[in-house]
Image (cartoon, rainbow, N blue to C red):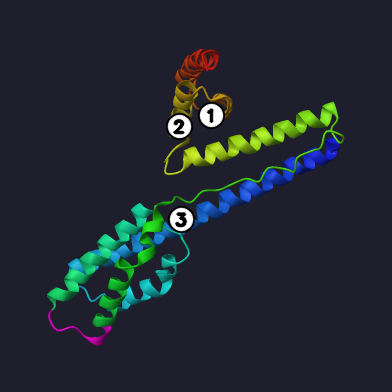
Amino acid sequence: MSNQQSLQSLETLLEKFLDQVVNLKEQKLSVLEGINRLDDITSMSGQGVEITDHIGEWFADHNRWLTDNSLRKSEFNRISEMLSNIKSELEKEGLASPAQKKISTEIDRWQNNPIKIDKSKPTRMTLSRPPEVSETEKTPQADTISLFIKKLSKMSSMFVDSADSKQHILSVLEELLKKTGTEANKDALILSAFIIYYLKQNGYKVDPYVKKLKEAETLFKKGALHA
């Protein structure tokens, strides 16, 4: 693999990663919007507002969530809770109209859906490593670039896994620093240093984290020594 080919491989890898980030963000925003909309409908129901059309439209827009694995378990449970509240309000009204009966059936279908157990798996992104290079194709220069591409891919996946369910990059950094010391994880150490540098370049005060990084590095060296 030539130097230029290695750089092109790195560029392709980063483009795929960014595409995955955008797609995941859009999916999460879509789920959040749908949950907020259902929350509004639940509040309307509790206030005695006629919500038959609203909840019918919500089901039409979001029933696909039962089959496309868009939801985490916590999100699925939150939706089920709100649907239960809506069903309770409908039952308080006594004799149900055909539309209300249909809504009640839809709520039961959602809550009794057998695939809800599978919703415990969080949405994750994966990065495919570039093809392995045979010994005969390697040159010292190209090999170092290939190794860096693989390392970047591995650390990118680590960041995505750590960022799942986190609200801020500082929370990710805290977890990685802890992992560096407790697991003697070199990739976590390198990624932590990269994040700290990134934060510094964007105006964050990173002195406390630089100190934590040094402490984590000391623990890492001790752990690696006794491994």
Q: Position of residue 68 (x, y in %)?
A: 48, 64
The mark nearer the N terminus, 2 or 1, is 2
Q: Residue at x 48, y 18 (%)?
A: 216
Determine if residue 48 is in view: no
Going by the numbered disc 2, the residue's amino acid type is Leu
Provide the residue designation for mark 3.
29
Q: Position of residue 30 (x, y in %)?
A: 45, 60
Foreground pick, 6 / 128: 128
Q: How many marks?
A: 3
Query: Which quadrant does the N terminus fall into?
Result: top right
Q: Is residue 10 magenta?
A: no
What is the residue that sits farthest to the bottom in this orientation? 98
Please name which of the two marks, 2 or 1, marks the residue nearer to the observer: 2
Pointer 2 and pointer 1: residues touching (CB < 8 Å)?
A: yes
Q: Position of residue 182 (x, y in %)?
A: 44, 23
> In this image, 75 relative to 104: left or right?
right
Please provide the residue range marked out in magenta: 94-99
Foreground pick, 104 / 34: 104
Going by the numbered disc 3, the residue's amino acid type is Leu
Secondary structure beneath disc 2?
helix
Going by the numbered disc 1, the residue's amino acid type is Leu
Q: Residue at x 61, y 36 (%)?
A: 154
Mark 1 surroundings: few (<14), some (14-19) or many (≥20) residues within 10 A = some
Task: Identify whether 167 is placed above or below 227.
Answer: below
Mark 3 surroundings: few (<14), some (14-19) or many (≥20) residues within 10 A = few
Q: Residue at x 21, y 86 (%)?
A: 97
Secondary structure beneath disc 1?
helix
Provide the residue designation for mark 1.
199
Q: CA distance from mark 2 to mark 1?
A: 9 Å
Provide the residue designation for mark 2.
170
Foreground pick, 200 / 135: 135
